[in-house]
Amino acid sequence: MRRSKFAGWALAAALTVAALTACAQEEGPILLPKPKPVAKPAGPTLLVTCDLACNWKLDGKERGPIVAGDSATASVSLGQHVVVAVTTDGLDKMEKKLDIVAAKPTLVRIDLTPVRDARLKTEQEAKAEQDARDKAQQEAQVRAAQVEAAGTWTDPATGLIWMKKDNGIDVDWHQATDYCQNLRLAGYSNWRLPTIDELAGIYEKTQDDDHWNNKGRIKTSGFIWSRNQGEYSGSMASFSFGLGKQYSWYSSTAGTRALCVRHSGG
């Protein structure tokens, strides 16, 4: 009886295994769910903004353009990095050095407007200075042309060579001295202010329509500075061809003119 029960159980177990095997063959293998991958922590990144349209580089490598007011991103490693931005016209540039110490986003703000404004201000100042130099040079050329056109007159009594026309504008004594020292006329450069006696020596009262009142008919348009000291401290002597008299003026007074002279012998 026991053998009969045991044989029955064995047969039942064998049939169960056979049924499971057949089922597995029909439905395929039983798949277990795959484990989910572990997310890696995000690395450091740069968020670069530019107030003007620019092209930028990261560590010397071109990264493309950035629209004005827009931004661009880039992944970086920990450590030192260099961001360079240049306006699209290539005139303004800014460089920033970064030290990335944490794996997180880093904002890099590029403000090129102050750089551009400083450049424009410098250019404007340089242009103003150049314009002033050009104007001074043009005025000097005009004065030189006027003097050249006036020519010279040589006094036969003394051999002194005089300008035929004074400088035409009121200057102080120091400016008059510089004017004669810098004068280039008739192929000579060694011009100077005359002495008061030299000025008085060419005075000659005339009755013609020009009223130059001098021997050489030199055109004088005001008081003429001399190289001699005046009658009081800080003054220099001048001569009036209209009145035929000597006067004294403070050397800093810009109310007298320059008439240059030189020796014929050099």
Image (cartoon, rainbow, N blue to C red):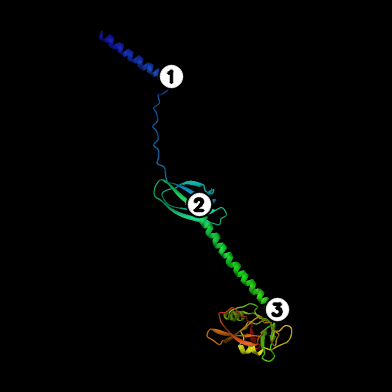
- Picture residue at 39% right of the left edge, 19% below the top: 21
Disc 2 residue type?
Answer: Lys
Residue 45, position as x, y percentages in the image: 44, 46
Mark 3 or mark 2, earlier in chain? 2
- Picture residue at 70% right of the left edge, 80% below the top: 150
- The outermost residue toward the top is 1
Residue 38, position as x, y percentages in the image: 39, 37
Above or below, comparing residue 93 to residue 171 in the picture: above
- Pointer 2: what residue? 57
Q: Report the disc number at residue 149.
A: 3
- Tell me the SS state at disc 3: helix
- Picture residue at 49% right of the left edge, 49% below the top: 49
- Tell me the SS state at disc 2: strand
Instruction: Indicate which label's residue lies in the foreground, 1 or 3.
Output: 3
Comparing 35 with 152, the one in front is 152
- Picture residue at 58% right of the left edge, 65% below the top: 128
Comparing 181 with 56, the one in front is 181
- Tell me the SS state at disc 1: helix
Q: Report the disc number at residue 26.
A: 1
Residue density around tag 2, few if under 14, some if 14–19, many if 20 or more, within 10 Å: some
Residue 98 as seen in the image, left or right of residue 153? left
Disc 3 residue type?
Answer: Ala
